Amino acid sequence: MNNFSINDHNHNLKYNLLHEFFWGFGVAFHTIYAAIPLFLKELSAPDYIVVSSAGIFSFVVAFPTLFSAGIGRNIKDINIAVILVHCIILSVTFLMGFTFMFFDSELVGMAWEVYLTYFILYAFSIGIIVPIWTDFLNQSTLGSHRGRFFGLGFAFNSIGTVSYTHLLANET
């Protein structure tokens, strides 16, 4: 970007902090290493599925990055691409929530299989998003301020997670 200024960088930083806060808020509810195995166990998934859910997640995230990284190099409008790939994960999470909110999991004989399918689609979506999101961040930040950008982003992600856990603790 030829005329990318510090004001442009700071503008993008503000939106990224908002994004990271709400991502952290959501991850607190849907953490890969704690909530997912517990939920699968609650749905009567076999133990080998429950204990391997984090490994399944890692593998399924890694696989599509091979393709989306290659495709990402040819994207003309990275802003539109970032929004579109985020719509993939929004669709998956909406369907997951809709299914388990409006259909009684006791009536679904294989609820854990339905959830595992959504979980795999969720992981696959992240694998598509990550290379495109990384390219977007590379183009929307100043190289000399990138460390601060990511440091603040991770801090706001953590603040979102802590905020959710405090809200949850006050509800119980």
Image: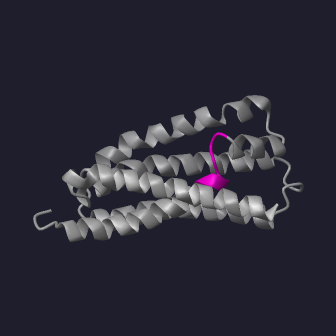
The image quadrant where one finds the N terminus is: bottom left
How was this image coloured? Answer: one colour
Residue extending farthest to the top is 48
Residue 136 position within the rendered picture, expressed as x and y whole percent measured from the top left? 30, 57
| Residue 72 versus residue 8 in the image, above or below | above
Residue 72 visible in the snapshot: no
Residue extending farthest to the left is 2
Q: What residue range appears in magenta?
A: 26-33
Write the residue at 16% across / 66% down: 4
Write the residue at 70% across / 64% down: 167
Q: Does residue 108 appear to the left or right of 54 in the view shown?
A: right
Residue 164 visible in the snapshot: yes
Residue 82 position within the rendered picture, expressed as x and y whole percent measured from the top left? 37, 62
The image quadrant where one finds the C terminus is: bottom right
Q: Does residue 27 appear to the left or right of 96 in the view shown?
A: left
Write the residue at 33% across / 55% down: 149
* Badge count: 0
Residue 118 position within the rendered picture, expressed as x and y whole percent measured from the top left? 64, 51
Residue 115 position within the rendered picture, expressed as x and y whole percent measured from the top left? 71, 49
92 falls in the magenta region: no
Front-most of residues 8 and 130: 8
Q: Does residue 91 appear to the left or right of 170 in the view shown?
A: left
